[in-house]
Image (tube, helix red, strand yellow):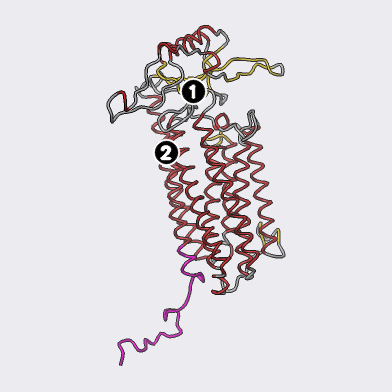
Amino acid sequence: MAHEHKLAIFRGLLKFKSNTQKIWGVLIFLSIITAVEVVLGIYKPESLMSQVLGMKGLNWIFIILTLVKAYYITWDFMHMRDETPALRRMVVWTAVFLICYLIFILLQEGGYVFDVYKDGFIKRDF
Amino acid sequence: MSTVATTGTEGKAWGGGNQPLKSSYGKMMMWFFIVSDALTFSGFLAAYGFSRFKFIDSWPIADEVFTHVPFFHGNFPMIYVAFMTFILIMSSVTMVLAVDAGHHMQKTKVTWYMFLTIIGGLIFVGSQAWEWGTFIKGDYGAVQTKGGNILQFGEYIQKDGEKVFKRVAVSDFATANHHSDRAQHERKNGLWFVSEGTLPDFTVDEVAKGLASHSNILVRSQIINEKGEKTILSRAESLKQIKENGKLVVHGANLTVNEYGSPLFADFFFFITGFHGFHVFSGVVINIIIFFNVILGTYEKRKNYEMVEKVGLYWHFVDLVWVFVFTFFYLV
């Protein structure tokens, strides 16, 4: 098996000349995302603090940026981009499905327990 | 005639010998291990989410917990952990460069990149240990109530023309009365099989007395108000809460108490970052083994550096997990 790498990222928008160049390019991209996260985390702009789908807008931004970072680590550092579609789907779809399922169940249950504490007859303020 | 001489399927897709995934056994098994390990970590993080949603109105604010940077005094939320994230991403880069050099059979380059990766891993584990130490030590101290809630202290000060709430350490206003101290229960002076941890520096009575004599100090409860800040009680309410509900003076965090809020926060912090730190540590150990194999020329003899690629996958996975831990513990 030859070690051929797909050298384009952002759906072909950015093409690199060699694999080494692509690695540095991805590093710069990941560093920028981390810097954005840290700046947003420190300053917490007021405009992003409104509730969107049960969570602060800022938190959604953090989660989306994290998934973007995870994508590029897996695709370019772990070379998932160069694996066959079958292997990629086996790994990614299985994990994504099971993790979404688990998160849904546990967060739903956590919210329910919170409501029981809040509206039920359980005293916690002492 | 042997049992299976010919099957008539030679050369056909089901005749065997082909590689539908075009990946070696070792790499594929590393991927499947990573899937299962990812599920373990998401189990932990989802459990953290469960506990957080359960106490969504009183969960500690991470920006107030992790504010320290080694060798510097002051309030720097997130800076150090951002540095740690960068170190780990950087060591991921050197790892992938080592893999790339391996594909081109450049032994010296692989050696150097592996070396840098190991250094990055060690810096990260060291930083993690320091982070734990700071968290365990705590900074201001607080009073835990009978109901297990945390009461912290502070005062309003003028800063740039604005009224801001500044935290005050328990030791700044409470005076220990050494005559009333209860003796610590040690194995040698009580039941030989029972002992207890260090006693708190102050009793709740001493804190209540100190609070009564410092009229500027107020209590901050752990309830988050609609502005996303912890609720600050009035002076009368502060005195009443400490007097009636105060049970234990806590300083720092461990598995049973946590001066920053819910003990569950500390439990999950130790458990998840500990489990991740253990992965980093084992990654460093495996990297060192492969590093020496590279130096000894094992992979030159094998004429391929796939082993470097396999530990590389594991090392990137550790980085991947940290990206999520960083988001859910420090940012969200």
Amino acid marked by disc 1:
Ile
Magenta: main secondary structure equals loop
- Specify start and end residues of the magenta stretch as a single range: B1-29
What residue is at 56 percent from the left and 68 percent from the top? B296
Question: Dot 2: what SS?
Answer: helix
The residues tagged by marks 1 and 2 sit, at their Cα atoms, a distance apart of 21 Å
What mark, if any, has residue A108 been given in the picture? 2
B12 within the magenta span: yes
The answer to whether tags 1 and 2 share a subunit is: no
Q: Which mark is residue B258?
A: none
Q: Position of residue B281 (x, y in %)?
A: 50, 50
Q: Which of these two is toward me, B69 or A58? A: B69
Q: Would residue A54 appear left or right of A110 to someone viewing this image? A: right
Identify which residue, A5 or B279, lies in the foreground: B279
Vertical side of B47 occupied by B193: above or below? above
Q: Horizontal and vertical percent for residue B68?
A: 60, 32
Where residue B93 appears, x then y in whole percent? 63, 55
